[in-house]
Amino acid sequence: MPIDPRAPYDDSNVFARILRGELPCKRVYEDDFALAFHDIAPQAPVHVLVIPKGRYVSWDDFSAKAEEAEIAGFVRAVGTVARELGLVEPGYRMLANIGQHGHQEVPHLHVHLFGGRQFYAMVSQD
């Protein structure tokens, strides 16, 4: 089902349930602003999701409504997770899917961190 990035937050989404402790996850990192855990269907040797603890549907929702401290805390958490997982060198891919065209599947902002292998250009280099 397509996700409307501007829709009201749905407290029954899987990430909200993980944040409340109703569903398990393989935690990588947690602080006051974010939770990071391994994806249950990894697309790379390292595939971690980083989610804000606040109720945000998408990057659009987060960037419009989050307090400055939440934004800074979340962005720093993403960087901390990448460093702690040893992804900075030789590099990694960071991806946030937003809305239908972005193929967003869960209506809670999340960033994918992919690493552990060489990635290719996302667009043709012609």
Image: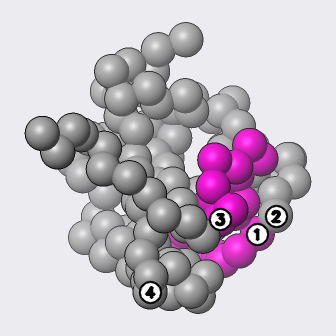
For the residues labelled 2 and 4, the Cα–Cα distance comes to: 23 Å
Q: Which of marks 4 and 3 is nearer the N terminus?
A: 3
Which quadrant holds the N terminus? Answer: top right
Of helix, strand and loop, which one carries label 2?
A: loop
Circle 3 residue? 46
**Three-letter code for the amino acid on which mark 3 is drawn:** Val
Residues at badges 2 and 1 in contact (C-beta under 8 Å)?
yes
The residue furthest left is 126
Are the residues flagged by discs 4 and 1 in contact, CB closer than 8 Å? no
The residue under the point 17% across, 45% down is 125
Q: Which residue lies furthest to the top in this view?
A: 1
Q: Is residue 35 visible?
A: no
Q: What is the three-letter code of the residue carrying label 2? A: Lys
Q: Distance between the residues labelled 2 and 1?
A: 4 Å
Q: Bin the neighbour count of mark 2 within 10 Å (Cα to Cα): few under 14, some 14-19, many 20 and up.
A: few
The magenta stretch is 27-48
Identify whether 55 is placed above or below 25. above
In the picture, measured across the screen, residue 56 lies left or right of residue 32, that is left
Foreground pick, 90 / 8: 90
Mark 1 and mark 3 in contact (Cβ < 8 Å)?
A: no
